Image (cartoon, rainbow, N blue to C red):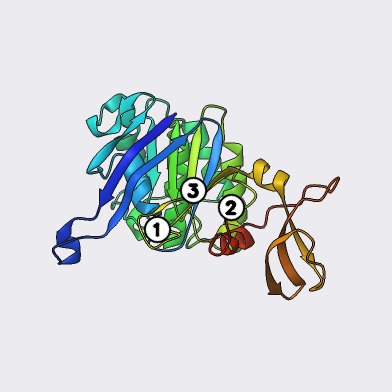
Amino acid sequence: MIEVKNIQYSYPISVWRSKQSPRVFNNFFLTLEENKIYGLLGKNGTGKTTLLNLLAGLNWGQKGSIHVDGEDIEKREPSTLGKIFIVPEEFELPNMSLEKFVKLNRPFYPNFSDEVLQRCLRDFELDKIQDLSALSMGTKKKVYMSFALATNTKYLFMDEPTNGLDTQSKSIFRKVMAQNMTEDRTIVISTHQVHDVEQLIDHILILGSDDGSDNKLLMNKSVAEITNEYSFEYRSADDTDGVIYSELSVKGNAVIAKRRGNQDETQLNLELLLNAIKTVQL
């Protein structure tokens, strides 16, 4: 379990060249439980990447604490860091073969699995790689995500993992992620490409500010809770029964409505949910 308690975080003043830097979080709380794939969503500037960096111990808050299985992340104990892996949106890989890269980095991850690595590489249709730095952006993503999954860390954070992937690779990404989810693992995926992860995630975290102040969690609910309470449908303009939010689409009005009596659950429309959060309280 990861517990975020009363975190305050502002960017360094030097970054903004002003006497006061914007505060991203203030009195921010969050608990991440085991065996869940979280979707971390929100518009640009709401602190998604910052939160991932805080969870991974790459950034430190000015106030508050983050504990990973009871250990303070700021102590950066090897036993704690060995449970965490983060795949940033942008990164560089060194001028070396994948074999050498694995040999240098696997000692930091006690549960590293060559079997998982080779399976992921096969799924992504990647052959032996001699120079990681020469790969295209999409191929780098696939290699690095394969390594990330092979670390078998208890906590895996991914920032925009499907950026740079073609349609087929995105489909393989979903398959690879699902195959390597275990009961004690926690995965947090931050993305704007909501359709790429809609079928993967089982818990929604939406960051934002509803009054122009510090960012907070506008939503912290499981997909099951959301679809149990609301339906996501296409309706005619005159059918407004129970409708909480609607927007025009090529299929008619796309709506979020309170579920009716014995109505079957509908599939979550994540893009519609994100648009609704901007204007209504769910």
Residue found 57% across the figure and 28% down from its top: 183
Q: Nearer the viewer, mark 1 or mark 3?
A: 1
Q: Does the CB distance between marks 1 and 3 fall below 8 Å? A: no
The answer to whether 127 is drawn above or below residue 73 in the figure is: below
Whether residue 229 sits left or right of residue 178 in the image: it is right
Whether residue 280 sits left or right of residue 42 in the image: it is right
Whether residue 137 sits left or right of residue 120 in the image: it is left
> Can residue 97 be seen from the camera position used here?
no
Mark nearer the N terminus (1 vs 3) = 1
Give the residue type that dot 2 points to: Val
Q: Which mark is residue 46?
A: 1
The residue at which mark 3 appears reads as: 189
Considering the numbered disc 2 on the image, is that residue within a helix, a strand or a loop?
Answer: helix
Mark nearer the N terminus (2 vs 3) = 3
> Are there few (<14), some (14-19), or many (20+) residues within 10 Å of tag 2?
many
Residue found 37% across the figure and 47% down from its top: 51
Residue found 31% across the figure and 41% down from its top: 7
Q: Does the CB distance between marks 2 and 3 fall below 8 Å? A: yes
